[in-house]
Image (cartoon, rainbow, N blue to C red):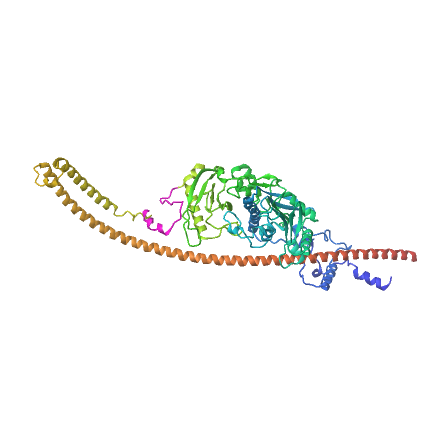
Amino acid sequence: MDVETKEQIAAVEIKKEKTDDHNELPEPTRTSTPASVIDISSTDSDDSDDDSDVEEILRKRRKLDGVLPLGFLDPIRPEERMIVQTTPAGANTSTVQSNAVVQSSFAELLDNSLDEVCNGATYVLVDVLINKRDKNKMLLVEDNGGGMTPDKMRQCMSLGYSVKSKMTNTIGQYGNGFKTSTMRLGADVIVFSRCPGADGTSSTQSIGMMSYTFLRSTGKEDIVVPMVDYERSGQDWNKLMRSSPNDWNRNLDTILKWSPYESEDDLLQQFNQLKDRGTRIIIYNLWEDDEGQLELDFDVDPSDIQIRGVNRDEKKIEMAKDYPNSKHFLTYRHSLRSYASILYLRIPPGFRIILRGKDIDHHNLVNDLMFTKAITYRPVAIADGTPKDPNTFAVVTLGFVKDAKYHIDIQGFNVYHKNRLIKPFWRVWNAAGSDGRGVIGVLEANFVEPAHDKQGFERTKALARLEARLVVIQKSYWSTNCHEIGYARRRRSNKSVSPDRDYTPSDKGKSSALPYSNGHLHSDGGSATKRKREYIYSDSRSKLKETSDFVSQECMPSGRPDCIDGHPHSRVDNIIRDEQASTSFNAGSIVKLEGENRVLSERLEQAGGAMVIDLSRDLQYERDRCKSLETKLQEAQREIEKMDKEQESLIEIFAEERSRRDAEEDILRNRLKDASNTIQDLLEKVKALESRRVLSCKTEH
């Protein structure tokens, strides 16, 4: 055996003796790291450091036969990977909000189709398609409205443009609903729209694509939306050039490369579904959740599209089977069919919403209620833009849901704006006990403005007043009717508050109609004196009237009063004397009572002034307290925002760190595997050399 071969064998030979304790790898039972996870202390080492790490690991191996521990080279199991949990289990607020955004995205697309009723739309179809290229699922939204001309198609796919903001009977306002909703559901969307000719113009059809995959893969800095247009000539569709044939062909090539369709014929076949007009939207490359599953679940119910996540509570799904009148409250968060059935307060006659081949039945929540009551709420004109039209009002219809007798915790107000549901089951009263349970309300509030995403209202004074009034309405209804469904009667308040109007400064003077709670001061102070004086006056008037009547009947046959004085009739003289005495007595009593009234009035003014001072002091204290609380709230919000930003940055750092660690783990695993193969080959060579040496020794002997 030559010297070089011996040196190679010596370099890879594994020692049978134990190494020192400080060089020895810990036993698997004494380490907190799983056997299949490599703990990388640094991620910035270069190739030479990686080589030295590999050599160090090889040097520390303790197996005598050179074989790595069982499962050492297996891929890391998902449960062994690092998981960054941003919120406690069961309270993932971001997931709840994300699911709400998914619902809002569906609602935006349905809004656009409903707005096309004025252009002849009779249906909107939501369904699932299969991408022929990658066999993944796609989302389809189609209507038979008026379609879009090439110019309108470009406006539709431009951020911030909206024709509907100037139209009173449409829901769209900001011009970003289509873009944000489609991109929230999937990375890419392709739109087919056919518009019939009008005013002597030819029919057109357009194809547009918004592709995040295309922009990301090609490194585009600007948002590029390729579109191609066609114009009808007789029975044929000809290319409609807006610039040059090269640009038209380039846009078509881009669409064919990044869309689910491989040829121009495949694209044009999509228009066959639209007949003479309409719009067909196909969203593909749908987003996935953290577990690698689609956010939208198409499999659990073949006639529905559901949302995965914390909003899909199996307990509520089972409860919905037992309490059918509460079904929408329990399922609207995760079921598109349930949500769409209550999305609109009214559906135009003949308009259909079709989900996966089955019509969605429009549902009015009022039909689920019992002991219903309608209250008219009239907002007060304020300075922040609330309409000052005195005819502005909202009819609040509320009642107990028919399942309320089971005392399940269901309550809230469905608040609509221009026929569209903005706040579903808005819980305005959060009582500590069971108060408020079972009360559902429905109203259409067109005097408050919805937020840009239509998931809530802008926080204005008008909304705050509405919320406060809804609390009063619910409390009043609950305390009056809760015993009807098995709860204990609630005590009625002495003060009566009108639930149908706001409190205004003009009501200040009317507050004295209610007694003070201490029982010492009443607004009708001095009323006893006043009633006594009125009694005296009325008694005097009645006597005078009686005398006058007698005189006119008995002593004035001619109708002349000049014969009364000195009249020989004794009854007349007696009546006159009695009346004079009564009048003198009444005058003295009146003077005395007026004096007492003045004293009482002064005492009332003094007591009222002291109380006003006390109330003013208490009011100022409450104002200062509210200001300090607002300051603390703002500071807390700033801290929360700061912590959120820090949390996001930490998550990004952890994600980057994990990706680097995964990459390095893969590199190290490959190197370890190659090293193991090399060692195995060398061991086999050593064994072969040993066998040859044994044979040579035997031969020599």
Residue 493 is at least partly visible in this image: yes
Image coordinates of residue 97 in percent, x first then y, are 55, 50
In the rendered image, the quadrant that contains the C terminus is bottom right
- Please state the total of marks drawn on the protein image: 0
What residue is rendered at 22% in x and 51% in y?
A: 598
Q: Main secondary structure of the magenta part?
A: loop
Q: Judge whether residue 488 can be spotted in this image.
A: no
Image-based side of 570 in relation to 497, left or right = left
Q: Nearer the viewer, residue 413 or 686?
A: 413
- Asked if the magenta segment contains residue 331, the reply would be no
Q: Position of residue 375 (x, y in %)?
A: 42, 42
Is 596 in front, or is 213? Answer: 213
Question: Does 507 lie within the magenta span?
Answer: yes
- From the top left corner, tell me how far across and down residue 48 is, in percent: 73, 64
Residue 338 lies, with reference to residue 671, above or below; the image says: above
Q: Which residues are magenta?
A: 491-514
User: 633 or 439: which is nearer to us?
Assistant: 439
| Left or right, 555 with reference to 464 | left
Q: Nearer the viewer, residue 82 or 104?
A: 104
Tell me where residue 57 sits by quadrant. Answer: bottom right
Q: Is residue 246 above or below residue 533?
A: below
**Which residue is outermost to the front?**
200
At 25% across and 51% down in the image, what residue appears? 601
**Which quadrant, please, contains the N terminus?**
bottom right
List x then y, in percent, for residue 521.
29, 49
